[in-house]
Image (cartoon, coloured by chain):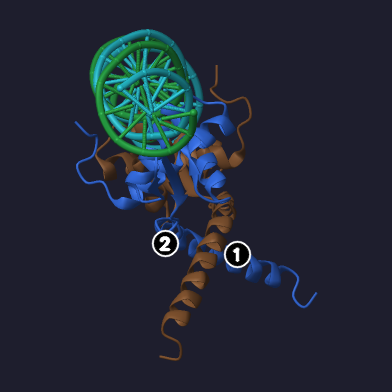
Chain colours: A blue, B brown, C green, D cyan
Amino acid sequence: MPRQSRETPTDHVFAALAHPVRRDLLAALLDGPQTAQALADRYAMARPSVAEHLKVLRAVGLVGERQAGRNRYYSLTPEPLALLREWLEPYEQFWRGRMSRLASLLDKESPHD
Amino acid sequence: MPRQSRETPTDHVFAALAHPVRRDLLAALLDGPQTAQALADRYAMARPSVAEHLKVLRAVGLVGERQAGRNRYYSLTPEPLALLREWLEPYEQFWRGRMSRLASLLDKESPHD
DNA sequence: TTGACGCGTAGGAAATTTCCTACGTATGCT
DNA sequence: AGCATACGTAGGAAATTTCCTACGCGTCAA
């Protein structure tokens, strides 16, 4: 039974990115599509473990797969990261608000420096 | 024993943001500093559980605390989210690269539409 | 000083995650 | 056909996370 009944796509993206290995896999795919075996070699990890992580990434749409003979190439599809950027927005706004308040405070303390 | 010997601040920020409750707490703190009790009431969760989550957020620098008599107010300090934005950068670059390749491909298919 | 309240943390149970080896299936080479 | 290789997934052990109640400390009001 899941802990939360309502899970948003953003929830899943954050969960997928939570694990360092999965972020490493995404970074590796910046170099282009690769097989699970190649990725496993690169990170000194058993291939089935890598496959599990890739499954998680695939479920949230961060990687795609393409079959080529007996090889399967995984590729980066970064579109869901837009959800992360959207999530960031109110916090950056909050941050800018604090900065400008700080600036005007400093300005009042020592005006026209 | 930790799973990885080298954990970066970015690792910790991602781990802290992985849990929906902790993201909810950050969102609540956008409204201003609040006590653990007030946050617990807001999310129908026992106060000690909220305190644990706040401790995680505090450890990565996403919240600060201010003692006021017997109350302790937690506040949002969003600076560490800059690490998240930095992490995003190569993927957005990758994305833009794909978009422009797609655009030129479409342009070649039906030029000067 | 005494009692009520807000707080953090200890201790532990339940759920989840992570990683492995073992296995069965499909593909390509000889 | 026969064998080696790449693959996904099952099954299970170990570690981690999450959440609770219980407890002890500090603070305010009478």
Residue B65 % position (x, y): 52, 42
* Mark 1 or mark 2, whichever is nearer to me: 2
Identified by mark 1, the residue type is: Met
Q: CA distance from mark 1 to mark 2?
A: 21 Å
The total of numbered circles placed on residues is 2
Q: Is residue A96 visible?
A: yes
For residue B87, above or below residue D12? below
Quarter occupied by the C terminus of chain B: bottom left
Determine the residue positioned at 56% across, 46% down: A27
**Residue at mark 2:** A86
Considering the numbered disc 1 on the image, is that residue within a helix, a strand or a loop? helix
Q: Is residue A70 visible?
A: no
- Is residue A3 shown left or right of residue C28? left
For residue A6, above or below residue A82? above
Crowding near pointer 1: few (<14 within 10 Å), some, many (20+)?
A: few
**Residue at mark 1:** A99
Considering the numbered disc 2 on the image, is that residue within a helix, a strand or a loop? helix
Residue B38 % position (x, y): 33, 43
Chain letter of the residue beneath label 2 in the structure image: A
Q: Which of the pair D20/B71 is nearer the observer? A: D20
Determine the residue positioned at 19% across, 42% down: A5
Identified by mark 2, the residue type is: Glu
Residue A55 has which mark?
none
Determine the residue positioned at 51% across, 41% down: A25
Chain letter of the residue beneath label 1 in the structure image: A
Q: Which of the pair A40/B54 is nearer the observer? A: A40
- Is residue B20 shown left or right of residue A89? left
